[in-house]
Image (cartoon, helix red, strand yellow):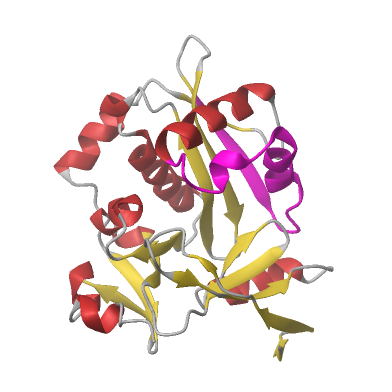
Amino acid sequence: MTTQRLPHQIMTFFRSGPMPCPYLSGRVEQQLFAELSGAKALDAFDVLSQGGFRRSHHIIYKPACAGCNACVPVRIPVARFKASKAWRKVLNRNSELIITEVGTKVTEEQFDLFKIYTNRRHGDGEMAKMSRRDYAAMILSSPVDTIMVEFREPNGRLIAGCLMDRLVGGLSAVYSFFDPQEERRSLGSYVILWMIEEALRLDLDHVYLGYWVAGSPKMDYKSRFRPLEAFGPNGWTEIKDPSSLITSRERLFPPLR
């Protein structure tokens, strides 16, 4: 247990027990975590997000795994982002979508799409086990400025959703889901492209993508957005090539002892 003084608030941090790693088979995960609560929750969350922390419900957390530093916090500096030819094609393929911010509204339609997505894409993970109550809690239990965004076809069909947090200086992607049968649309990437455009519209500096994990196919897509900044011992620095964060797999994933 560690006590840390943040601006106008004292937070107590705990370290979780070992759990199976959700990203790398055979690895063990541990987290440093604290509760977000009170009138200063948003201020604390903003400061901790700049230090590589993420949020789930009312808990702020960061990996603290013995012998492994695979989870690298990454963010996009939106003012310097230039859409490549491939990204422009993704934007064009989805230009007819109707995008609506619905606050913290929870619907059966959202949950049905969420279940289709998690069962198809992450059937072996904890998200696929979530009930409707769990899904609602993910949206409603936030102590910060959290918004659900819906992406619909012109006929009204919901094909994607994105839960995001609004920080003082950026947008943070909490969880996105989409119709897995719409592969041609590249909806996961499109949601991030929309977040970049939204951050620019709101005059914000960054889009926080969470953790990039080398060797995890689930996380590879994050490294395709450039420029990309990673958080490390020297703070946030731009990475030209994500593979430069790894000198060897043995160094990143040393044998367990």
127 over 211 or under it: above or below: above
What is the residue that sits farthest to the top in this orientation?
155
Q: Residue at x 44, y 62 (%)?
A: 206
Q: Does the magenta stretch include residue 128?
A: yes
- Front-most of 105 and 64? 64
Q: Nearer the viewer, residue 76 or 55?
A: 55
The magenta segment: 122-151
75 to the left or right of 102: left
Q: Quadrant of the C terminus?
A: bottom left
Residue at 38% x, 71% y is 72
Quarter of the view holding residue 1: bottom right
Front position in the image: 91 or 36: 36
Write down the quadrant of residue 250 in the picture.
Answer: bottom left
Asked if 241 appears above or below 251 in the picture, the reply is above
Q: In the displayed orientation, state which residue is furthest to the left.
A: 85
Q: Is residue 48 left or right of residue 26?
A: right
The image shows residue 53 at horizontal and vertical percentages of 55, 72
Percent x, y of residue 69:
38, 79
* Relative vertical location of residue 185 with respect to residue 49 in this rendering, above or below: above
Residue lying furthest front in this view?
A: 257
In screen coordinates, is 92 left or right of 86? Answer: right
Q: Identify the image quadrant of residue 215.
A: bottom left
The residue depicted at 41 percent of the width and 69 percent of the height is 27
Q: Does the magenta stretch include residue 112?
A: no
Horizontal and vertical percent position of residue 196: 40, 50
Query: How far across and down, in percent of the image, does residue 150 sit?
Result: 55, 30
